[in-house]
Image (tube, helix red, strand yellow):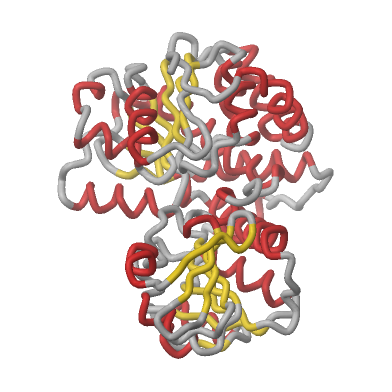
Amino acid sequence: MKPNEIRDITLAPSGRQKIDWVRANMPLLNGLEEDFRKSRPFEGVKISLSVHLEAKTAYLCEVLAAGGADMSVTGSNVLSTQDDVAAALAVTGMKVYAYHGATAEEYERHIEMTLEHGPNIIIDDGGDLVNMLHTKRPDLMKDLWGGCEETTTGIIRLKAMEKDGVLKCPMVAVNDAKCKHLFDNRYGTGQSVWDSLLRNTNLIIAGKTVVVAGYGWCSKGIAMRAKALGAKVIVTEIDPIPAMEAVMDGFEVMKMHEAAKRGDFFVSATGCNKVITYEDMLEMKNGAILANAGHFNVEIDVAELEKKCLEKKETRKNIMGYRLENGRWIHLIAEGRLVNIAAADGHPAEIMDMSFAVQALSALYILENHEKLENRVIDVSDEIDLLIGRRKLAAWGIEIDTLSEEQKRYLNSWDL
């Protein structure tokens, strides 16, 4: 294909409409776009980005470009790229390498092409840019100052690299910022997962039993929204602390193999592999529905399912049915890929407004501090979190109290 590997440039008007819609609902990025357009902090800076390529991501790209950044863009999942949005970015002059339904080989090529830009800063979602730079194309790191990582799975990979002493660039843990994981992971994932499950299955949730694997921030949001929809919720965990939280939040907690016998819907969100095994599937009811909300399609053991099933067929758009050895059918949504974005539109615009504001300001932090940063995983500063929090409240028209000087002295004193 052409250097800009997109499906169809004529789709651009539809993509522009989507971008303009989210732009109207992302006040934090609106403000940063205005600030960046005036100050042009990224003038001459090359940024390579791999994030789910849909409208909110496209607007982040445009905000960075407004600040002078030379953008090279790809997706972070073969099913989450929206071709009309990719086309809309391409017609602005950005380098875009992504299309919906790419093969694994095409996806890897797009990651590599995005990095051949020779980036100063990378913005990653799941660690695929970092992995490519460290394993296959270390030559492209010569001008790299550092990067930002969007999601839990990516942070897990980066911390493992840091522990093993192989991380060769500083990476900001955007996912761990308060204005990201407390809102994006919980409220964004909670709403968008059920948006996807509702629109793809057209089934009632009330009265059903939902099994949620894990009880981190994403799973808490999924469980909370399932309960609100009238479901009975079972949580599975490996860590006693979140397991206790789940109990005190009113949910049943048990092992997956036991929960498998009771669930109607299963949603994984752990960052680990083989959370739902083929042996678990054999215990499930006829017609059980499986979905994954973790970044990679390894949480449900799809490979073993594909190998051992007796029959498979598409039972509805985005849903594949599998007949197991025991004669029962189970249904898998979006190939076990990230269900809320591979088979829907992802998180709400207002939520991604906060997450992508953290991304933009973290990229600015790298620009301004890269000469003194170490090759490790770096926390987002409280200053960035508080700035975003204040701006978001202001956009909502909300004012909060401030400490008096006397209160500050009291809180910082030990001799009361």
Q: Is residue 216 above or below residue 59?
A: below
Compare residues 393 and 332 and report the one nearer the observer: 332
On the picture, is 370 further left or further right than 385?
Answer: left
Q: Residue at x 71, y 63 (%)?
A: 198
In the picture shown, does residue 24 fall above or below 331?
Answer: above
Seen at 52% across and 77% down, the residue is 329
* Residue 173 occupies quadrant: top left
Residue at position x 46%, y 49% in the image: 151
Label total for image: 0
Q: Is residue 70 above or below residue 29?
A: above
Image quadrant holding the C terminus, namely: bottom right
* Residue at x 25% of width, y 22% of height: 140
What is the x, y in percent for residue 139?
Answer: 19, 22
Single out the residue that lies furthest toward the right. 397
Viewed as shown, does residue 279 lie left or right of 318?
Answer: left
Q: Which of 176 and 74 lies nearest the eye of the viewer?
A: 74
Residue ranking furthest to the front: 311
In the image shown, does 86 or 9 lie closer to the viewer?
9
Q: Quadrant of the N terminus?
A: top left
Residue 408 seen in the current view: no
* Coordinates of residue 10 in the picture (x, y in percent): 66, 18
Determine if residue 17 is in view.
Answer: yes
Is 31 rendered above or below residue 94? below
> In the image, is 240 to the left or to the right of 412?
left
Q: Position of residue 148 (x, y in %)?
A: 42, 37
User: Which one is nearer the viewer's eye here, 114 or 312?
Assistant: 312
The quarter holding residue 152 reads bottom left
* Rendered location of residue 167, percent (x, y): 22, 40
Judge from the rendering whether residue 399 lies leftward or rightward of residue 236; answer left or right: right
